[in-house]
Amino acid sequence: MEISISKQQLAALPVAQFRGTIRVVDDTESVEYAIGRLRNADIIGFDTETRPSFKKGQSYNVALLQLSSDDECFLFRLNKIGMPEPLKKLLEDKEKQKVGLSIHDDFRNLHKTYDFEPEGFIELQQFATQWNIIDKSLSKLYGILFGKRLSKSQRLSNWESDQLAEAQQHYAALDAQACVEIYKHLNAGLFQPSESQYIIRQTDEEI
């Protein structure tokens, strides 16, 4: 038995909304407060955003790093503050559980600029396979579990803008929060593969 949602099924789902508080961290004075709040969370959702490139050979460094609890997301503007020591220590803390999707791509991009050794991370792509889910994207995982889709309208926006638009903030925060929601939902045993409407059925020709 395999679980998968098609692009057409995903597109028909209602759009998910971020629920909680968003805090933009764009000065070093705000970092300690943010890290203190995050260390109180039982698990932290992780994601990054990079300014898109539309020219061949042109690339940008990671501009934004999102860390979210259940109901509070901090958007660290790395293009403005770099990676302060408290943030680096949190990413390297093997005792503090963090969860993300396609995290090795994020690490590779971050390592272009910053020297750190990530520890304590859970990869959702691998974790979800225990429930026979074969889809690898965050949007599809979220759609299968919660019947809602993550809007991608802001993905190619400029993450190095002087001020992040409200739509950008909600997009970035929801991606990190979604990682927490997916992990907790699966880990709590709330998803039963045999009851999913997205089981891939064999056709008569395949049987």
Image (cartoon, rainbow, N blue to C red):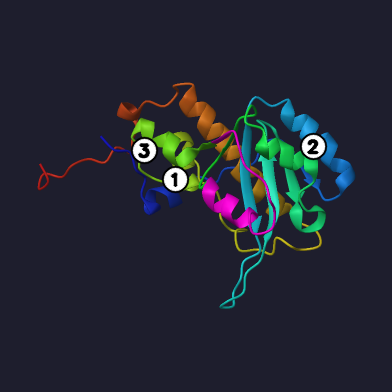
* Residue 160 against residue 116 in the figure, above or below: below
Residue, disc 1: 140
- Does residue 105 show up? yes
Q: Earlier in the sequence, mark 2 or mark 3?
A: 2
Residue, disc 3: 133
Amino acid at pointer 2: Ala
At which x and y percent is residue 186? 46, 28
| Real-space CA distance between mark 2 and mark 3, rounded to the nearest whole angstrom | 34 Å
Depth order, front residue of 193/14: 193
On the rendered image, what quadrant is the C terminus found in?
top left
Residue 183 is covered by the magenta coloring? no
Question: Circle 2: is it few (<14), some (14-19), or many (20+) Cα within 10 Å?
Answer: many
Residue, x 65% and y 41% (percent of image)? Answer: 18
* Residue 53 against residue 4 in the figure, above or below: below
Mark number, residue 34? 2
At which x and y percent is residue 63? 70, 57
Single out the mark in the foreground, 1 or 2.
2
Q: Which range of residues does the magenta coloring cover?
A: 103-121
SS label for mark 3: loop
SS label for mark 1: helix
- The image quarter in which residue 195 lies: top left
Residue sitting farthest toward the bottom:
56
Q: Earlier in the sequence, mark 3 or mark 1?
A: 3
Residue, x 48% and y 38% (percent of image)? Answer: 124
Q: Earlier in the sequence, mark 1 or mark 2?
A: 2
Single out the mark in the foreground, 3 or 1.
3
Relative to 111, is 163 on the left or the right?
A: right
